[in-house]
Image (cartoon, helix red, strand yellow):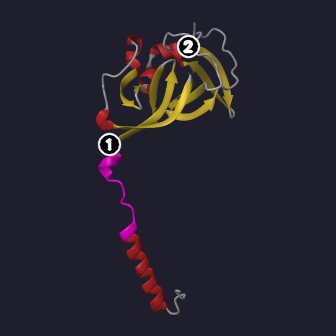
């Protein structure tokens, strides 16, 4: 049975033993080069296509909110939502890309994005959370529909699925996206 230390030398000796034990049994830290080779983003689905949004654009993920329609706007503009006292325009991303409007279901989510002065809520079919990819496996040619080419910039394969990086910068700079009036 170990007795508690009785004097300062015993305390120092015990601390040194703890230090040696910790150094000998500590798990190694990941190498810096390993950390640099990973890319992450928010995974989401539009119809049957899997995408990843770069983290620097994503502000929040939320359930589909109550929206007020905006008269005279395009069909893919679902309306304006009051999110904690801030007005957020809600856009149907699938509808904007020339497909049918997204049916609102239990798993439907709004991906709130922000860049400079622009804030928008993008309706997506489903959110998959954070996705991590090894950058050495980046495929610059990966993509989907020809119509969508300007909105993707390559991607990764993970878990048997192609995850295309959705180019949010291109989206928020697109005249077609910014022109919401009929």
> Farthest residue in the bottom direction?
7
Image spot of residue 180 (x, y percent)? 55, 13
Quadrant in the rendering for residue 85: top right
Image spot of residue 159 (x, y percent)? 42, 32
Image spot of residue 118 (x, y percent)? 52, 27
Q: Decide if residue 100 is on the left or right side of residue 137.
A: right
Q: Is residue 32 magenta?
A: yes
Closest to the observer, 159 or 102: 159
Image spot of residue 72 (x, y percent)? 63, 8
Q: Is residue 133 above or below residue 167?
A: below
Q: Secondary structure at mark 2?
A: loop
> Farthest residue in the top direction?
182
- Numbered disc in front, either 1 or 2: 1
- Quadrant of the image containing the C terminus: top right
Closest to the observer, 24 or 83: 24
Residue at left 42%, top 86%? 13
Sort mark 1 into few (<14), some (14-19) or many (20+) by Cα contacts within 10 Å. few
Quickly name the residue at label 2.
Answer: 180
Q: Disc 1 versus disc 2: distance between alpha carbons?
A: 39 Å
Q: Is residue 8 above or below residue 18?
A: below
Mark 2 or mark 1, which is nearer the start of the sequence? 1
Q: Which mark is residue 88?
A: none
Sort mark 2 into few (<14), some (14-19) or many (20+) by Cα contacts within 10 Å. some
Closest to the observer, 85 or 141: 141
Magenta region, residue range: 24-35
Q: Secondary structure at mark 1?
A: loop
Quickly name the residue at label 1.
Answer: 37
Residue at left 54%, top 30%? 127
Quadrant in the rendering for residue 39: top left
């Amino acid at each position: 049975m170990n007795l508690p230390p009785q004097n300062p030398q015993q305390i120092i000796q015990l601390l040194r033993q703890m230090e040696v034990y910790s150094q000998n049994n500590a798990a190694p830290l990941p190498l810096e080069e390993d950390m640099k080779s990973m890319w992450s983003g928010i995974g989401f689905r539009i119809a049957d296509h899997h995408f990843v949004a770069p983290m620097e654009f994503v502000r929040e993920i939320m359930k589909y909110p109550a929206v007020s329609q905006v008269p005279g706007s395009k069909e893919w503009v679902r309306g304006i939502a009051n999110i904690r006292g801030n007005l957020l325009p809600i856009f149907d991303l699938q509808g904007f890309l020339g497909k049918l409007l997204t049916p609102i279901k239990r798993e439907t989510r709004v991906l709130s994005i922000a860049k400079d002065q622009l804030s928008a809520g993008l309706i997506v079919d489903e959110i998959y959370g954070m996705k991590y990819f090894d950058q050495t496996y980046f495929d610059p040619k990966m993509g989907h529909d020809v119509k969508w080419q300007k909105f993707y910039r390559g991607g990764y394969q993970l878990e048997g699925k192609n995850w295309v990086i959705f180019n949010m910068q291109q989206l928020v700079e697109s005249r077609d996206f910014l022109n919401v009036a009929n």
